[in-house]
Amino acid sequence: MRTILVVDDEFGIADVLEAILTDEGFSVVIAANGRQALARIAEQRPDLMLLDYMMPVLDGAGVLHALAADHSIDSLPVVVMSALPEEAVAAVTRRYKAFLRKPFRIRSIMAAIEQAMPADGGPRGTAGGAG
C-alpha cells in the first residue's frame, strides 16, 4: 500500500483529504506544518507528499528547500496545494511535480497524484480513478 503524507494547517482540509485518499486505497499520514512533515518523513518516507504552500512554523517553500538540500529525500514527489496562482509558487520554486489550486475537486486531487506519482505508484495499479 502506498503512503501519502498530507501537510496542511487547515484540519478540515487534511481530514477530507485523508478520507478521500483512504477510500482510494492509500495509507495517509497527516502533518499540520512543515516541521512536522519533515519529522514524519524522517520516521517513514512516504511515496508522495501533498503540501500546503502557506503554513505557520515552516511553510511549503521551506519544506521544498529542505527536501532539495537532503539527497536522501530530494526525489520525494510533491504536489503543492495553494490558493495562490501557480505562477506565484513557481516564481519561488519549481521543486514539485504537480500543483493543486485551492479550492479543488476530488477529480483534481486524483489527477495531480497520478501526475506526480510514478506510473506504478497507485494502490490499484493506477493512482486512482475516482471522480
Image: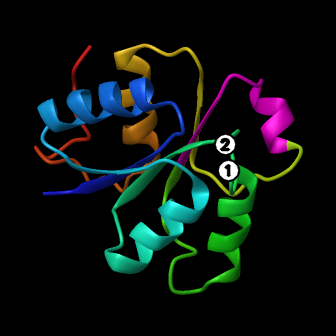
Q: Considering the numbered disc 1 on the image, is that residue within a helix, a strand or a loop? A: helix
Q: Which residue is mark 1?
A: 60
- Amino acid type at circle 1 is Gly
- On residue 55, the disc is 2
Sequence order check, earlier mark of 2 and 1: 2
Q: Considering the numbered disc 2 on the image, is that residue within a helix, a strand or a loop? A: loop
Q: Magenta segment range?
A: 79-90
- On residue 104, the disc is none
Task: Say if 66 sits above or below 56 in the image.
Answer: below
Residue 12 locus on image (x, y percent): 40, 24
Q: Is residue 83 magenta?
A: yes
**Tags 2 and 1 in contact by the CB under 8 Å rule?**
yes
- Name the residue located 70 percent from the left edge and 38 percent from the top edge: 54
Residue 25 locus on image (x, y percent): 12, 41
Q: In what quadrant of the picture does the C terminus appear?
A: top left
- Name the residue located 62 percent from the left edge and 83 percent from the top edge: 70
- Name the residue located 85 percent from the left edge and 33 percent from the top edge: 88
Relative placement, left or right, of 54 versus 77 is right
